[in-house]
Every structure is written in C-alpha cells, then in structure tokens.
C-alpha cells in the first residue's frame, strides 16, 4: 500500500500535484459497551486535543504496521486485528505538504490502556464524543463510523488550524488498497 493508490479516491489535480506525508489514526473500540478510547495529546501537533492514537508512518514499515506501532507506543494496547475505516486528507494554508491520514478501528486488542508521554487515554461513549476538544473535522466524519460506512474526506484548514475553509466528504464502497 502506498500513497499512489490514493489517486483513485482523490482525482483532483491540485491534490495530485502536492507532496504528501503519511499518518495513521487508530480508534480502539469496545462494541459491547459502546465505548471508544481517545487520548488527550500532551505534546506536539494537536496538543490539548482528544484524538485517536497515531502518527507518522516510518519509511521501513507499512501503514498498518505504523498504525499498530503508534497504538502500542501511545496507549500500550496491542492490536489483534485492525480495520481501515477512512482516509482523510488535510491541507493547511501556507503548508505545501498534504497530510494523508489512514484511519483504523481496532475491535480486538490485548493489554490495558495506560498513559504515555504523548497521550492520556480515556474511554468515551461512541455517541458522546468530546468534539469541542477535538479537531474540527472529527465531528463531520464520525457519523460514518457510527453507521459502519467507509469514508474519504478532504479538509482544507485555515492557518489557525481551527477553521475548515472547504471540504469534500463521502462514503466509499471499499478502502482495500492494492
Ligand atoms: C487536521 N485534522 C486532524 N484531524 C484528526 N486527526 C489529525 C488531524 N491532524 C492530524 N491528526 C492526527 O494527529 C496525529 C499527529 O501525529 P504526530 O504527533 O505529528 O506524529 P508522531 O507521533 O509521529 O510525532 P512525533 O514526531 O513523534 O512527535 C496523527 O495521528 C494524525 O493522524
């Protein structure tokens, strides 16, 4: 799986012409209790926001490996299986590099969540997420997760990192990259 395969979801020339950096975003879910694990980010990009677990994919690993590694580093949970549920593309004003974020749900894991240097984990009801303390895009695509639909979203953020100037978001049949 590599960034070229994203081309079939996002066809606009503006996107194709940009440099991309790969990221992951992982949400451990407890379906029985209807809970999702978020982490309060303690440092770096998105500090003081709740989010899923994730970060940059390293050159030596696949996207799925990067997702599992970041989950373990930031929460101490070990994913037993992961399902990709979304693809998010973020463009920030004055930043020439687009963020390509691969979103995963983890329904099976081992271990118990624990605070790390980067994240303070906390379980939330899947119908009651703290959207005011999350990235502005999260409340827009979370309904797709609740409906079990896969999604692709593009969000153009203002330099203040809070205002979405433009967006495209929709369901897709499959996110199985070739
Ligand atoms: C703009 N709207 C957004 N909405 C939802 N989630 C967003 C996001 N923008 C970034 N994210 C996520 O935030 C994490 C940053 O990762 P980030 O801390 O930069 O990576 P990494 O852990 O590798 O950093 P270090 O270089 O080790 O500090 C990573 O999961 C990425 O998917």
Image (cartoon, rainbow, N blue to C red):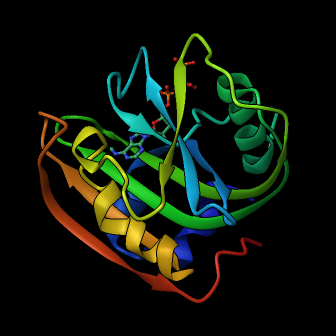
Quadrant position of residue 92: top left
Coordinates of residue 7 in the picture (x, y in percent): 53, 71
Q: Is residue 71 visible?
A: yes
Quadrant position of residue 95: top left
In what quadrant of the picture does the C terminus appear? bottom right
Q: Residue at x 37, y 53 (%)?
A: 129
Coordinates of residue 159 in the picture (x, y in percent): 13, 35
Q: Is residue 138 above or below residue 114?
A: below
Is 135 or 122 nearer to us in this picture? 122
**Residue farthest to the front?**
33
- 112 with respect to 93 (left or right): right
In what quadrant of the picture does the N terminus appear? bottom right
- 33 with respect to 166 (left or right): right
Coordinates of residue 102 in the picture (x, y in percent): 58, 55
Q: Residue at x 53, y 22 (%)?
A: 119
**Residue farthest to the bottom?**
173
Coordinates of residue 146 in the picture (x, y in percent): 49, 74
**Residue farthest to the top?**
117
Q: Residue at x 54, y 66 (%)?
A: 86
Q: Is residue 151 visible?
A: no
């Amino acid at each position: 799986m590599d960034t070229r395969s994203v081309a079939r979801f996002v066809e606009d020339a503006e996107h194709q012409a940009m440099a991309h950096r790969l990221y992951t975003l992982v949400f451990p879910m407890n379906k029985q209790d209807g809970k999702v694990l978020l982490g309060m980010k303690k440092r770096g990009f998105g500090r003081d926001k709740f989010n899923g677990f994730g970060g940059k994919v390293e050159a030596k690993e696949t996207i799925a490996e990067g997702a599992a590694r970041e989950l373990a580093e930031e929460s101490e949970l070990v994913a037993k299986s992961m399902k990709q549920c979304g693809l998010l593309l973020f463009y920030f004003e004055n930043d020439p590099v687009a963020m390509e974020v691969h979103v995963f749900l983890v329904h099976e894991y081992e271990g118990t969540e624990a605070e790390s240097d980067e994240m303070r984990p906390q379980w939330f009801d899947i119908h009651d997420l703290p959207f005011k303390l999350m990235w502005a895009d999260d409340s827009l695509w979370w309904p797709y997760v609740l409906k079990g639909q896969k999604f692709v979203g593009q969000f153009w953020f203002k330099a203040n990192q809070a205002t979405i100037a433009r967006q495209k978001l929709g369901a897709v049949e499959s996110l199985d990259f070739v």
